[in-house]
Image: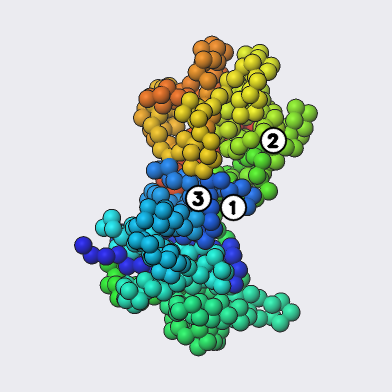
Amino acid sequence: MAHAKHIFVTGGVTSSLGKGIIASSLAKLLQARGFSVTIQKFDPYINIDPGTLNPYEHGECYVTEDGAETDLDLGHYERFLNVPTSQANNITTGRIYYNVITKERKGEYLGKTVQVVPHITDEIKRNFLLLDETGKYDIIITEIGGCVGDIESLPFIEAVRQLKWELGPNDVVVVHLTLLPYLKSAGELKTKPTQHSVRYLSESGVQPDIIVCRTEKPITNDIRKKIALFCNVHINSVIEARDAETIYDVPVLMRKEKLDERVLARLRYPYKKEPDIEAWKEFLGHLKNPTEQVEIGLIGKYVELHDAYKSIAESFIHAGAYNNCKVIIKWIQSEHLNEESVHTHLKGLKGILVAPGFGERGIEGKIAAVKYAREQRVPFLGICLGMQCAVVEFARNVIGWAQANSTEIDLETPRPVIGLMAEQKDITEMGGTMRLGAYSCELKKGTKAYQAYGKIKITERHRHRYEFNNAYLNEFEKKGMVASGIHPEKELVEVIEITDHPWFVGVQFHPELKSTVMNPHPLFMRFLKATMEYAKKQQQVEA
């Protein structure tokens, strides 16, 4: 079996430069040339997965089809490549050490002293190559999280050094992303931080083959020559990564810089064909030239960090481009909402999305937003906890159960319309124990959900512990809230909607996790169309 070629993407100078976007853009170009490509992320933190991390600190926790809780960069990988990722695509230091310590406890090291080198680095290399063993890929791109020079990153960099020596220079390429800061007072870009970053990498035994320079100004030929000379790379391997209007511009910009050609030349990989990115360019054309515009409120408790809802924001971009409509998201902190203030905050919105989350903080604000959307007949989409809030609000204000609640919020509620799933009741550990990954759902014909998907059987990704309490289902449906989607094996309510509302849908799953550039999610497509129709009716009323 032929082995895959490996590309490692490292970063220096500062975090948040966009290694994930560069990796995704390079992968997109290689895929467009006919290569089978995947991307994996190795994170240097000790948490075994991001599932227990605070969204304020790490952004959203992305969930794969097979139920892995992963870094949000895997969302970019899927959105760019339109190919699902899995548990094998995201590994942390915590997972590496857990695997090594488990082996040590089982006696697999035969009494040897377990050390960072070779045992930790061997485990890292083993995980680098796991996707290679599937035989499905021509090229595997590995993003190394953190910054070169960080103590936590050292074992990963050492593993890259060893693998490059073991596989040979024609099978491994290292792409290093750095920052070229612009000093306004001096009126020039400075290369010294890049030089220091490459020196850190070289001192660890890894010489980058290609340097991608994040910059807000164009790179002159003199600067390219200087970086090439001091960083020991060919001048053609100094790539400009200018700040872009949208992340979806980056594949086109990297094509202009010939990043894909430089990588393939280093790998001694013959071109299969020139990259076909016409469909991507067409998407960009729609994205940048919308004919309509709507403002949609996103109600959540982590809105100060937009990355906490990254997949939702990107799903609106995908659906917006295909509907030739610019979606302006109004980020609304649910803690600021109550029965009195909700009209002030939500007035004028053409759609309302109540976002996922956990815990009591901000929950009454979300319920107030649901009530506003229901009573004002504004298009509504509730996701996970957002769907559960819609159920609680309906129970209180339509059915008349004033003390209805979720047992996540009130264990003593006399009307537990949302309760802990049966299989969750004996679980004490938090990490990786929720209902995770893809599950089937059957939609009822004639419903808004069925209209969106156009089929009965669907699968969607989940991340939750609480569910709709089926003991109350008959009362809800008598009053006009129907279960339009059911998990067939356990009869779990997956989708609810209000029959006499123009567009009011709540889903227990996370549709945003499956939206990609080439395949916008059908629920976001229909929700956006509903908001556009609502906006037109409002204009007619005002006229």
Where residue 331 sits in the image (x, y, percent)?
Answer: 67, 44
User: Alpha-carbon neighbours of circle 1 within 10 Å: few (<14), some, or many (≥20)?
Assistant: some
Which residue is most to the front? 111
**Residue beneath disc 2:** 362
Among the 4 quarters of the image, the one containing residue 519: top left
Label 3 SS: loop
| Front in this rendered view, residue 469 or 139 | 469
Where residue 240 sits in the image (x, y, percent)?
Answer: 52, 74
User: Alpha-carbon neighbours of circle 3 within 10 Å: few (<14), some, or many (≥20)?
Assistant: many
Of labels 2 and 3, earlier in sequence is: 3
Of labels 3 and 1, earlier in sequence is: 3
**Label 2 close to label 3 by CB (< 8 Å):** no
Among the 4 quarters of the image, the one containing residue 191: bottom right
Residue 95's place in the image compared with 416, above or below, is below
Q: Which mark is residue 49?
A: 3
**Residue beneath disc 1:** 58
Looking at the picture, which amino acid does disc 1 mark?
Answer: His
Select label 3 or label 1 by which is in front: 3
**Label 1 close to label 2 by CB (< 8 Å):** no
| Front in this rendered view, residue 56 or 181 | 56
